[in-house]
Image (tube, rainbow, N blue to C red):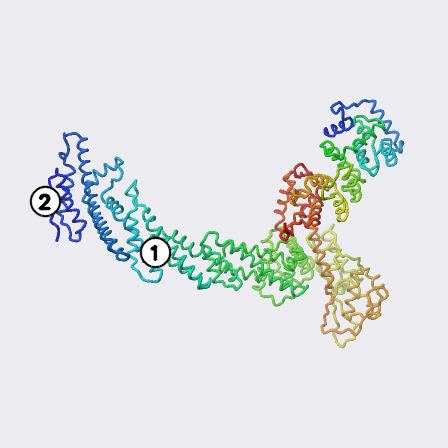
Amino acid sequence: WDATNAVNVYFNNPSSASAPTGSTSSSRTTLTKLFDKYRDEPRTSPDTISISGSMAYFQAIGAELDDISCLIASEIVSCPTMGEITREGFVEGWKDVGGADSIDAQKRIIAMRRSQIGSAAPSSRQMLKEVYRHTFKLGITAQGQRSVDKDTCIEFWKMLFAPPGFDWSTESTNWLQLWLEFVGANGVKGINADVWNQTFVFAEESVKDETLGWWSEEAAWPALVDEFVEWIHEKRGTGKGDDDEMEY
Amino acid sequence: MPTQMPPMPNKDDAKLTWAYLEAGVDKIMNELQDGMDMKTYMGLYTAIHNFCTAQKAVSTGGGFNSHNRGGAHLLGEDLYKHLIAYLGNHLQTVHQASKLHSDEALLRFYIKEWKRYTTAATYNNHLFRYLNRHWVKREMDEGKKNIYDIYTLHLVRWKEDMFTSTHLSVMDAVLKMVEKQRNGETIEQAQIKAVVESFVSLGLDESDSTKPTLDVYKEFFEAPFLKATGEYYSRESKQFLAENSVVEYMKKAETRLEEEKERVDLFLLAEILAPLNRTCEQSLIQDHSLILREEFQNLLDRDRQEDLGRMYKLLSRIPDGLDPLRARFEVHVRKCGLAAVEKVAADGENIEPKVYVEALLGVHTQYQDLVNAAFGGESEFVRSLDNACRDFVNRNKICKTGSSRSPELLAKYTDTLLKKSNAKMSEEDDMEKCQTEIMTVFKYIEDKDVFQKFYSRMLAKRLVHTSSASDDAETSMISKLKEACGFEYTNKLQRMFQDIQTSKDLNSAYKDWCADTYAAEENKNAVDATYSILGTGFWPLTPPSTPFIPPQAIVKTYERFAVFYNHKHSGRKLSWLWQLCKGEIRANYTKSAQRIPYTFQVSTYQMALLLPFNDADTLTYEQLEETTKLQKDTLDPCMNLFVKAKVLTCSPEGGKPEAGTSYTLNTNFKNKKVKVNLAITIKSEQKQEVEETHKTIEEDRKLLIQSAIVRIMKSRKKMKHTLLVTETIQQIKSRFSPKVSDIKKCIDILLEKEYLERLEGDELGYLA
């Protein structure tokens, strides 16, 4: 994950992107101590911060629960699921971000990333992608679960696909709104990892060309995306079926 | 009066020698009919020989070979030149004379002169053999141009001095004659034939005069002939079409083409047949192909086989002539098919399978006959027919709700055919014919899996209820399906058949076992029963959908069989499909005057509901429910049926089958028949079954698609998405036509189940 590292370094310390990560044993110790502070039940589960602890912690670093900053933070510390932080994820995560070992430093990083994540710059996009992909994991609540409840996904998309996240809209079309309307009305119950990830790719493409001229039924899009495109075409009256009767 | 020959000249005197020779040549040319005596001929021959071998004539020295050769060379040339001059003069005269004639007279003249000239050429060629053999040969060996043997020289001169200036008028005369013949007049064909031959003779290969070529003929005869033919038929066909129908025109064109072919045999070179055909086809067919094709639809509508055949033959002669017909034909057949189905659909919701299948077949048969009779069974037309049939069989008004309607109806039709009740259909020929017809429609069915589903369900019923008309007919149908779709398609059907066969043996073994195991008295009192043992995996049957306590009267019977069976095949589990079991019970209670009591044919469920009335005349709904444990949706229709058939009466009158209603045995039951069949399948049950079948089809399809995808990916490991979709369609096509979106859904499922993974660039990977 070199790209991730590079991005992490860049966002942590833009002025010295090329400088080696200042990982010292002292920052590890400080991070460990910080972790210990937020544990809920140090005796029964010494290496985990669970829901109430992580809520307090996220609040402390300025990551609001209904905001993309929460997803950004979750990705940094690799939350295995929503509201759960492991010691390893916490220490290694912050260490990779250049050893931001104080609440203040971490708060700064979260705020900075939040302000950058929606930008079209390749490095920002890469970061967004990491956060997006990780977000799916947050929705998994049970072992072996392969898809995430639709409503949960809708909440995630709202955070990810609107400023300060990726602005999924074009001149004539508010894609996010349409997508949420479509998914909401669709019969699917859960979104699997593939559909989740492909939605991101689709979002990127739709912003590049809002006529969807690049789309083809033969291409590898998941069925849900295909249905969405058909739905859009119907809505716009650009469906294939009525072409001969249309006058341009 | 033969011309007097001058005296034999001195061999050295060129001038005299030629004068002598010229007289001879002239005699040959103009008076050959008078004959020439041997002496004169020998004299001429000798003169040429002497002249050519004379050495003194021009030689200044002597004895050298080169001089000898040179001398002979020059002397030969002299004679050769004189001859050319002579021929020039002669032909000049002929040409002048020819100007006096025209048309047929010119032809006669030309041919006469030609014959005379060429005969003379043959003689002269002999006469000048010495010159040919030495001087001419040497000249030619040395590669001199424009030196020919004497015969050829004659032809060359004719071509130069006669042909060039007359061929136009000659051809003009020829073409006029041919036109006369085309207009129905009789002509002297031999003349044209002679002209053709003369033109051919003039075709000389410049580099090798011994090889004749057709150049002259092609340029001066064939080309104008074809041009005139084309013009003639252009004119004629336009005029004819303006005054006659297309159908009449086609007859005319056909006759004309035949005539032209005969003309070739009569007086033309066989060589011309191909280009002549092309010319005629252009003027007679190609130029009018639009009008002809316009008429096609008309002829189809009126089913004019003969005229359609004529049109087919005509248009098949021009390049790409038939393609538009095939396209129209396909559209037409499709329309007819759709119209036929529309007619059937107009009769309402309940479509009689037989009527539907016959409607499909009717259209197919009609147009297959047409293809065979009018289009010579041509494979491309067969393909168009197939396309059209496939289309209207799978997509028509009745299939509007889904293409599975056709296979469903076809399977139902097959069922009625193979069922016992169909007494009229017992003739073996008819059965064979009907089965063949079924296979004709089956061939076009896209959803072959749907047919298979319905067929196997109905076969199961026929077998379980022993309502099959004949084992032979069943076997023959299965083997036809096997032939069409392969072993896998009919595997289960065959296994079902086997099970029934095995069951027969098992039942007789059971009887023997009973006789051995139980006392005779006990066997006598036992319920007589037969059993069918059906392998779970092969039969499209599901366990009963309702809990059920079988009536006490049969418990002992089936338990005994279970003992026997487990004894024979330990470890096998028997489950009873009560919903398929049937029995007969005797109604001894009726007050009817009849001496023989009624027998009711009932299902096991019905049996269980009627038998309690042995102990009480009236029972409540709740009691019956309690005794049998049957669920409402099975119980209620049974009760309704009993009331409707007047076996039971209910109170309150017209009461619904529900708590509070009670039922009383109707002792006044009356029926015309002694055996009363109560085990009738109820409409709603049938409908439910159909729906169930469709549902299982959907599920099976998903599985079929998924397993095809996994199979493909397992062997390929990595594959482009589009390629995978195409390949999957390929594999499944023989069973049904999968939609791309369905395949993609299955890919989604497999991605989720992590059988597949998404790789870069639209590629999918297989995860073992």
Residue A80's image quarter? top right
Q: Is residue A19 above or below residue A227?
A: above
Count of numbered labels shown in the rendering: 2
Give the amino acid type for the residue marked by disc 1 in the picture: Asp
Q: Is residue B706 left or right of residue B283?
A: right
Numbered label attached to residue A20: none
Q: Nearer the viewer, residue A49 or A156?
A: A156
Q: Amino acid at mark 2?
A: Pro
Q: Which residue is mark 2?
A: B7
Chain at numbered mark 1: B
Q: Position of residue B487 (x, y in %)?
A: 61, 51
The local crowd at label 1, few if under 14, some if 14 to 19, many if 20 or more residues have their Cα within 10 Å, is few
Eyeballing the image, is B632 above or below B135?
below
Q: CA distance from mark 2 to mark 1?
A: 52 Å
Q: Quadrant of residue A139?
A: top right
Q: Secondary structure at mark 2?
A: loop
Pointer 2 and pointer 1 on the same chain: yes
> Is there a contact, CB below 8 Å, between mark 2 and mark 1?
no
**Residue B573 appears in the figure:** yes
